[in-house]
Image (cartoon, grey):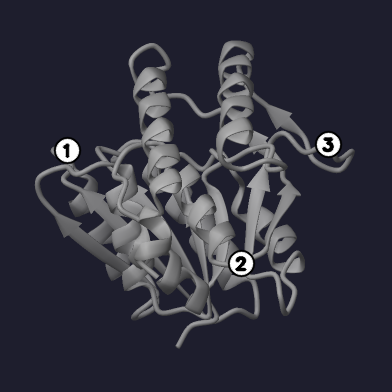
Amino acid sequence: MPYLSVVIPAYNEEKRLPKTLESVYAYLKSTDYSFEIVVVDDGSHDGTVDMVQEFAKHSDEGTVRLVSYAPNQGKGFAVRTGMLAARGDYLLINDADGSSPIEEVARLLEGLKPDNRVVIGSRAKEDPTAKVNALFYRKYIGNTFNLIVQSLLLPGIRDTQCGFKLFESKAAQHIFSVARLNGYAFDVELLYIARIHGYKIREVAINWNNAEGSKVNVLTDSPRMLLEVLGITIGAWIGTYKKRQ
């Protein structure tokens, strides 16, 4: 069983994923961690699958795995599939664009405590040792979205949407087996499930850089995410998530 599993959801990422895979693999090889990288191909139409398979051929046996299916189901589905398939003691969600440098996993691992089994990277928590390079309009929209999320579901969590989150394996199996959202608001659902099921969440400031080619369209996806958050809120009111314990 590996110490760390890195789960990378990918949809049409043949251009951005190679650099991320190379950096993740090289960093983990330089550590003392036993590891696996699980790439989840979410019904890509480009050369993502071929690229991952070729990368795996030139990697140590068993360190790079591909999970692939069709048709495209959404990022939430891809992350959930990968996390439930991962075998590590600790499971890290890492975006294919590499906006969160893999070296930042050290900050998250340091944040683990015996009673603290979910640690999330944050672009909003102030820390002089962490630098965030984000586009102004995306930062503004993200802050507005987070204010809504805090008021409805997750008070005290400043950044639910950073795609860099670490889970202890048993907590991950529990949380992701309850989760059901496939859209971009899946992060909110995961953290809400974690909180109501008694898992303490620690938010840690990390370095983060805006990456070109984002799949999120702020004009069309933001309203959808808001509707999904409202759906989670309604589910919270009627006890949907508690009933699935």
Residue 174 — which label?
Answer: none
Q: Secondary structure at mark 3?
A: loop
Identified by mark 1, the residue type is Asp
- The quadrant of the image that shows the N terminus is bottom left
Identified by mark 3, the residue type is Glu
**Pointer 3: residues within 10 angstroms few (<14), some, or many (20+)?**
few
- Residue plotted at (27% across, 69% down): 57
Residue 199 — which label?
Answer: 2
User: Where residue 161 sits: x, y (%)?
Assistant: 54, 38
Q: Between 179 and 105, which is closer to the camera in this rendering?
A: 179
Q: How far is mark 3 from mark 1, CA to CA?
A: 39 Å
Q: For mark 1, what is the residue?
A: 46
Give the residue furthest to the front.
Answer: 238
Q: Is residue 32 visible?
A: yes
Q: Secondary structure at mark 1?
A: loop
- The quadrant of the image that shows the C terminus is bottom left
Tell which circle, 1 or 2, labels the residue nearer the N-terminal end.
Answer: 1
> Going by the image, does 245 lie left or right of 132?
left
> Going by the image, does 191 lie left or right of 175?
right
Q: For mark 3, what is the residue?
A: 126
Q: How far is mark 2 from mark 3, CA to CA?
A: 23 Å
Q: How far is mark 1 from mark 2, CA to CA?
A: 38 Å
